[in-house]
Image: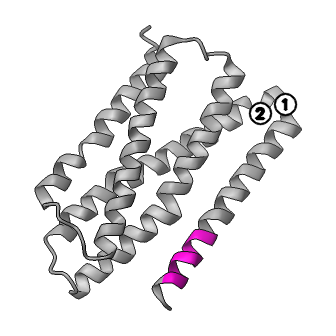
Amino acid sequence: MPETAQKSLAAKRAGIALGITAFAAAALIVVFGSAAYPWVKAFHVIAVIAWMSGMLYLPRLFVYHADTPVGSPQSETFKVMEGRLLNIITTPAMAVAWVLGLWLAWQSGFWSAPWLHAKFALVLALSGLHGYLSAATRAFREDRNTKSARHWRMINEIPTVLMIGIVILVIVKPF
């Protein structure tokens, strides 16, 4: 299958998964009203876990891919793994986490809470890192990576630090 067809198929699958999730969340909200809050919260946490899994695993794949010769069978395998992880799991999970998280913030009335503003800042940073990893996936796919395995090892720590901050803000609400 040509590369453009593979990308198109992956994008369609991700779009379908996102659409199904959005439809399910909307159905929960319409059917259960305010009783949907814990369900939406549960799906938000599930989406965050899936997003974080991808954010933690993708840079680790880059560590190994950076040390693999261009054009080798291993390099081609990493390209497939990275693309699928990003397009089928990580990006749709990020979108679902954002949509449900914004709804939860709106429903709960926490808009003016300083801890939520700090959380949004960290989630925006995580989203920016997601964009950076998406661009890196594209660079690896096109054999244009210029970063070392050491660089990707350091990048691999950023999602963990952001996640720790986000969880502390949500659970402890320190301010």
Give the residue at x 43% y 27%: 121
Q: Nearer the viewer, residue 35 or 149?
A: 149
**Dominant secondary structure of the residues highlighted in magenta in the image:** helix
Left of 149 or right of it: where is 168? Answer: right
Left of 54 or right of it: where is 19? Answer: right
Left of 33 or right of it: where is 2? Answer: left
Give the residue at x 15% y 53%: 151
Residue under label 1: 33
Q: Amino acid at mark 2?
A: Ala
Q: Amino acid at mark 1?
A: Gly
Q: Position of residue 143 (x, y in %)?
A: 25, 76
**Is residue 5 placed above or below 135 in the rendered structure?**
below
**Is residue 117 placed above or below 29 in the rendered structure?**
above
Q: Position of residue 167 (x, y in %)?
A: 42, 28
Q: Position of residue 114 (x, y in %)?
A: 49, 12
Tell me if residue 9 is in the magenta stretch.
yes
Give the residue at x 11% y 55%: 150
Q: Position of residue 133 (x, y in %)?
A: 35, 55
Q: Nearer the viewer, residue 79 or 160?
A: 79
Tell me if residue 146 is in the magenta stretch.
no
Residue farthest to the right? 31
What segment carries the magenta color?
Answer: 4-12
Q: Quadrant of residue 124?
A: top left
- Whether the residues at callouts 2 and 1 have beta carbons within 8 Å, the answer is yes
Q: Residues within 10 Å of mark 2 (few under 14, many from 20)?
A: some
**Is residue 5 placed above or below 105 in the rendered structure?**
below
Q: Residues within 10 Å of mark 1 (few under 14, many from 20)?
A: few
Q: Secondary structure at mark 1?
A: helix
What's the CA distance linking mark 2 and mark 1? 6 Å
Residue under label 2: 36
* Quarter in which the C terminus is drawn: top left
Q: Quadrant of residue 43?
A: top right
